[in-house]
């Protein structure tokens, strides 16, 4: 078995090492004897082919980078819609998550058109100094179990009109300042503000994505062998204990 992965704009959209999430997926697949091939697409590479991929990943970027990428990405709106409808999994971090919505109004009040595949939209906070920054803890049942997700957020964007969020916020901000909810999730699309080591900190989420992609590709039930996540669990519990016992949300 193998999975084919496409990383979009890796040289532009990789704030806080978001692309490291792919290393985690590859590591967890390889431990189970499954290959993962990673291809990339970026501006200047010619036409985007999405049909051969089981997972499409795009990391976050600053306003400047988002503006650059948005113009290119929009050319592929129909292809992307088709690939989502065909069941490929999309993992979208921060700036990428924003660009799959209707629009993003950046911190200079410029409107960056999104793909408009989903109905949410994002406006930057009016005060440039005021951003949603810091550790964040979520609770979600998308994997079929109620699990906690730990991570780090850093965005000025305030996302509204999310009809199916990824998770409930237990600590931190989420889709906007002190929001009750974080991210977007719908079957095979996960958009989240959680930057950097999302999947290394949350192996259950990594395995959920792996299982989805394998089952979707091979059209059969997959039981993943359990890996030793002792250190990941210790690290996660440390964060949960540190932040969940505080009284205020941030
Ligand atoms: N530029 C966007 C914002 O500030 C996204 C930033 C990011 O990807 N961290 O909301």
Image (cartoon, rainbow, N blue to C red):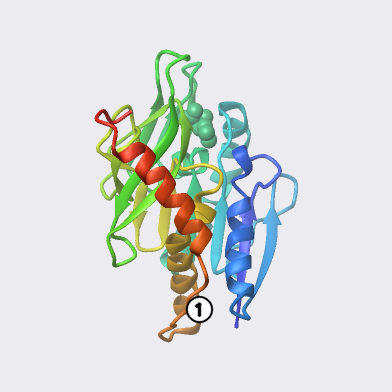
Residue 202 appears in view? no
User: The C terminus appears in which quarter of the rendering?
Assistant: top left
Q: Position of residue 28 (x, y in %)?
A: 58, 69
Residue matched to label 1: 217
Density class for disc 1 (Cα within 10 Å; few <14, some 14-19, many ≥20) is: some
* Snapshot quadrant of residue 3: bottom right
Q: Position of residue 223 (x, y in %)?
A: 43, 82
In the displayed structure, 67 sits above or below 109; it is below
In the displayed structure, 103 sits above or below 111; it is below
Q: How many marks?
A: 1
Q: Secondary structure at mark 1?
A: helix
Identify which residue is drawn at 35% across, 48% down. Answer: 184
Q: Position of residue 119 (x, y in %)?
A: 32, 43
In terms of depth relative to the viewer, which is nearer, 130 or 62?
A: 130
Identify which residue is drawn at 57% across, 49% down. Answer: 58
User: The N terminus appears in which quarter of the rendering?
Assistant: bottom right
Identify which residue is drawn at 64% across, 59% down. Answer: 23
Does ligand 1 reach within 8 Å of label 1's beta carbon? no
Q: Position of residue 76 (x, y in %)?
A: 56, 51
Residue 234 appears in view? yes
Q: Specify the farthest residue to the bottom.
A: 220
In the displayed structure, 37 sits above or below 90; it is below
Identify which residue is drawn at 40% across, 15% down. Answer: 126
């Amino acid at each position: 078995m193998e999975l084919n992965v496409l990383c979009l704009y890796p040289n532009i959209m990789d704030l806080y090492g978001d692309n490291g999430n792919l290393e985690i997926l590859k590591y967890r697949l390889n431990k189970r004897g499954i290959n993962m091939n990673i291809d990339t697409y970026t501006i200047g590479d010619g036409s985007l082919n999405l049909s051969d991929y089981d997972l499409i990943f795009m990391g976050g970027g600053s306003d400047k980078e988002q503006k650059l990428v948005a113009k290119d990405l929009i050319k592929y709106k129909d292809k992307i819609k088709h690939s989502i409808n065909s069941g490929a999994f999309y993992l979208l971090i921060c700036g990428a998550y924003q660009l799959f919505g209707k629009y993003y109004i950046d911190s200079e009040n410029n409107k960056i058109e999104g793909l408009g595949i989903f109905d949410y939209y994002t406006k930057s906070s009016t005060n440039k100094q005021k951003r949603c920054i810091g550790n964040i803890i979520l609770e979600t049942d998308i994997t079929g179990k109620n699990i906690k997700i730990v991570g780090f957020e850093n965005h000025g964007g305030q996302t509204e009109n999310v009809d199916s969020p990824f998770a409930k916020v237990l600590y931190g901000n989420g889709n906007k300042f002190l929001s009750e909810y974080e991210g977007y999730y719908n079957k095979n699309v996960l958009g989240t503000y959680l930057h950097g080591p999302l999947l290394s900190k949350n192996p259950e989420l990594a395995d959920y994505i792996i299982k989805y992609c394998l089952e979707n590709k091979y059209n059969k039930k997959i039981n993943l062998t359990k890996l030793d996540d002792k250190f990941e669990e210790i690290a996660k519990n440390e964060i949960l204990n540190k932040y969940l016992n505080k009284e205020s949300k941030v």
